[in-house]
Amino acid sequence: MNPQTTPAATPPATTLATPWGTLDLTRFPEDPRERLRAWDAADEYLLRHLAGEADSAAGAATALAGRRIAVLGDRWGALTTALAEHRPVQISDSHLGRQATRANLARAGAVVEDGLLLTTRDTPPERIDVLLVRVPKSLALLEDQLHRLAPAVHEGTVVIGTGMVTEIHTSTLRLFERILGPTRTSLAVRKARLVFCTPDPGLDPGPSPWPHRYALPPDIGPAAGRTVVNHAGTFCAERLDIGTRFFLAHLPVPAPGARVVDLGCGNGVVGTAAALAGPGAEVVFVDESHQAVASAEETFRTNLGPDAPARFLTADALAAEAIAPGSVDLVLNNPPFHSHQATTDATAWRMFTGSKRALRPGGELWVVGNRHLGYHVKLRRLFGNCQLVAGNPKFVVLRAVKR
């Protein structure tokens, strides 16, 4: 058989053996070339611990039966899918993670219930008997979410966190202790660790410090001195990052009536600057993070008021279901090059291909990125052209035009 026509077999890395059975798990969007798994040793450690505490999966099922389980930060749905028979509530900041969970639950034959897949912006459950926390990369997001969930936690709540040893620090444990109660850690197994927290109902952690607000510096163009709003977990919550600062100094001025997309909008400062520079333009803010889109909306409305034309979308890059093909004049993009702890250009490539699909003929994609990432190569391959707009030793601003 011609190897080029052989159907691709499911890579072994998609199969996770758990005490509740073997699961076929993928990230979202599914890509047969994807070599990053939809789980890691931290997820496995937590699942083994839950079964081990009851001596078996059957015993764990009995121990968990009838208890309200919440899973915070489940990255691709591995924990939620493994525990599906107990109808856990998943609380996630990631649109991609929620979509992966839907697909993984369906693949496992579980019922996908919208009311059990919550975002970090939704009202949390009133009572939680078992709280499982996949420790996020952002300590701020963990802080904010523990504050939001603390009223639902009671003296008998079982609280277990999990993460790789590189993700769990003294500051992580202090957050659990300050907001929920006394905390200890497990021994490391396969570079993963568990966090055990005993809730203290008498603890008063005070209000969440989020969102944060700060004023932009005076030398960055139309957005100079304007207020930025950052919900927890949004990139560069304390100050303007140097890449965005460089981008703001070289932004194009949108034409009146133009449709502009701030892709991977974060706190929305780029799209807000574009709206300030080009009154009358409609700006669409897109990010896969619910916290980011909430930040962008508050940043935009704080500076342009309630009636300025704008849309705010939580979506996978510029997927066709989010933005109609051929409907956009200008895309502004500062693509991420990390997915959790992994370095990857997969997100940037999806952003670039989605931008080409969404742009009208003659529409432009403007990208800022670290010089060493070589985005100009990808843009030339995709668009057939790429112009260097500006550069310094660290960053470049690139422009590609849809022909």
Image (tube, rainbow, N blue to C red):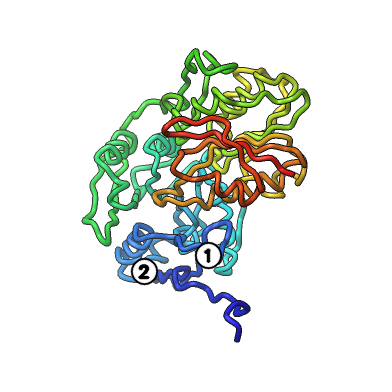
Q: Residues within 10 Å of mark 1 (few under 14, many from 20)?
A: few
Q: Which mark is residue 129?
A: none
Looking at the image, residue 63 lies above or below residue 377: below
Quarter of the view holding residue 31: bottom right
Secondary structure at badge 2 equals helix
**Residue closest to the eye, 64 or 177:** 177
Between circles 1 and 2, the one closer to the viewer is: 1
- Where does the image place residue 187, in percent across and percent down from the top left? 21, 56
Give me the residue at 71% from left, 49% from top.
320
Asked if residue 292 lies left or right of residue 236, the reply is: right
Q: Which mark is residue 59?
A: 2
Q: CA distance from mark 1 to mark 2?
A: 38 Å
Residue that extends furthest to the left in the rendered view of this protein: 187
Q: Residues within 10 Å of mark 2 (few under 14, many from 20)?
A: some
Q: Which residue is mark 1?
A: 33
**Which three-letter amino acid code belongs to the residue tagged 1?**
Arg
- Which sits earlier in the primary sequence, circle 1 or circle 2? 1
Secondary structure at badge 1 equals loop
